[in-house]
Amino acid sequence: MAKLKTNFVCQSCGNVTPKWQGRCEACGAWNSIIEDGGAAGIGAQQARGAKKGRIFALGELAHADAPQTRLETGIGELDRVTGGGFVPGSVLLLGGEPGIGKSTLLIQACAALALRGERVVYISGEEAMDQVRLRATRLGLAAAPVELAAETGVEDIVATLSQGKRPALVVIDSIQTMWTDAVESSPGTVTQVRGSAQALIRFAKTSGAIVILVGHVTKDGQIAGPRVVEHMVDAVISFEGEGGRDFRILRAVKNRFGPTDEIGVFEMTGGGLSEVANPSALFLTAHEDATPGVAVFAGMEGTRPLLVEIQALVAPTSLGTPRRAVVGWDTSRLAMVVAVLEAHAGLKLGQHDIYLTIAGGLRVSEPAADLAAAAALVSSLSGQALSTNAVYFGEVGLSGAVRPVAHAAARLKEAAKLGFTAAVAPRGAQSGESGGEAITATSCEHIGALVAEIARPKDGAPAKAANGKSKQHVDGW
């Protein structure tokens, strides 16, 4: 018999090495490498012999008995993120920080499906069944016919689920607590997580049941365990939120059956998670008077237009190296916008501290926020408040040119729906594209034109800075 090859796996990142090391070369973690006992399980499976399979023609699958429709939960924001509902036979990985509301959301989804006559099974590896029942009672869902179980053995779970009626939805909370006999390793290790996930995915594909795996997250927000699990599942969904805020954001990071980067917005209440019908109004702050340094950005999250408020503060500094503090946006992107303003608009920001934040705790990643961020910076530096009826969007290039962005019509339509009457956008975003709404789009082709328009004195008066000095006495002009 051939000798089985032994590998060593890092428990932090999943990197495989042929020998043990004190420090992982991939992620730099210390004492995280252990011996991988998965080879024995794989060899045992191969020893049983291979089975003959059948190859189907593509045309034959059109008449298969597998359900072709999605399973909707009735929770609109959850169905939006999944692409219109769960696809039968799919496996989803849901990650989020402790206490963010993952179990609450899943209990509500399970109860909604169970009340419609579907068989739903909630398997908890961390809590007892009484603890899950107490949560359901607090949410007013104790009467829902959801089947509960407290089990960690994957083989026992699959054998139990295979009996009786096929379950429509199975929730595994969490995948880090599961273990399989095919792998000789401790629960929670990279090898066990990978082996347990593979067994559950095989059950979902063969039975047509929908399986949701709950995953823990590390301190940097990544789902714990090997990254190969994210490649194995059909969708990866992240549940985000900030301490001290009631809203939660459900974001699709990967989705084989729908758009990626789609978001759903919820609000945490005493009765559980409630959907937010108008997320743009949640992230906008009502101002009676215009405030310097505030710009409204018309962004896109997946297929949903979303208006958010970008706030900037530019203040003189006495330090040798000015501070650049950013919350909710890419720091490198801010550095690029500042460099473009200095090189092509004549601003002097090298002796100023810059603070920029996305109001409401949302994180923005699309390049279309460049123009809104630049407008907020110029407004704060000059002391000139932007119009409260205008939105901004557009990508700023290194040459200072404002480049067009996608979904301009949807952005303008969302802005018009919320009462905005003007928009500063790249050339091509015409007013008529907003679907007949009462909004006027002003083309901005270069960042210099934006600076000149914002810093232009209103009604012939000199521009005032935040400290009351006229523009010609303000550093940076």
Image (spheres, helix red, strand yellow):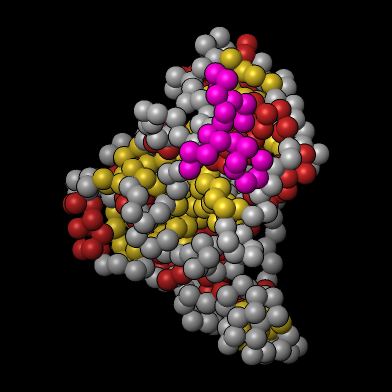
Q: Position of residue 280 (x, y in %)?
A: 44, 32
Looking at the image, which is closer to me, 342 or 153? 342
- Is 139 situated left or right of 429 in this image? left
Q: Residue furthest right?
A: 399
Q: Is 116 included in the stretch rendered in magenta?
A: no
Q: Is residue 386 visible?
A: yes
> Residue sitting at 73 percent across and 45 percent down?
342
Q: Position of residue 197 (x, y in %)?
A: 53, 64
Res. 301 image quadrant: top right
Res. 19 image quadrant: bottom right
> Residue sitting at 48 percent across and 43 percent down?
467
Q: Position of residue 228 (x, y in %)?
A: 63, 64
- Is 79 situated left or right of 143 in this image? right
> Residue sitting at 51 percent across and 62 percent down?
221
Looking at the image, which is closer to me, 192 or 76? 76
Q: Is residue 297 visible?
A: no
Q: Looking at the magenta stretch, what is its main secondary structure?
A: loop
Tell me where the magenta segment starts and ends, as one range: 455-477
As drawn, 170 above or below 369 = below
- Is 403 situated left or right of 438 in this image? right
Q: Is 468 included in the stretch rendered in magenta?
A: yes
Looking at the image, which is closer to me, 323 or 129? 323
As drawn, 99 above or below 465 = below
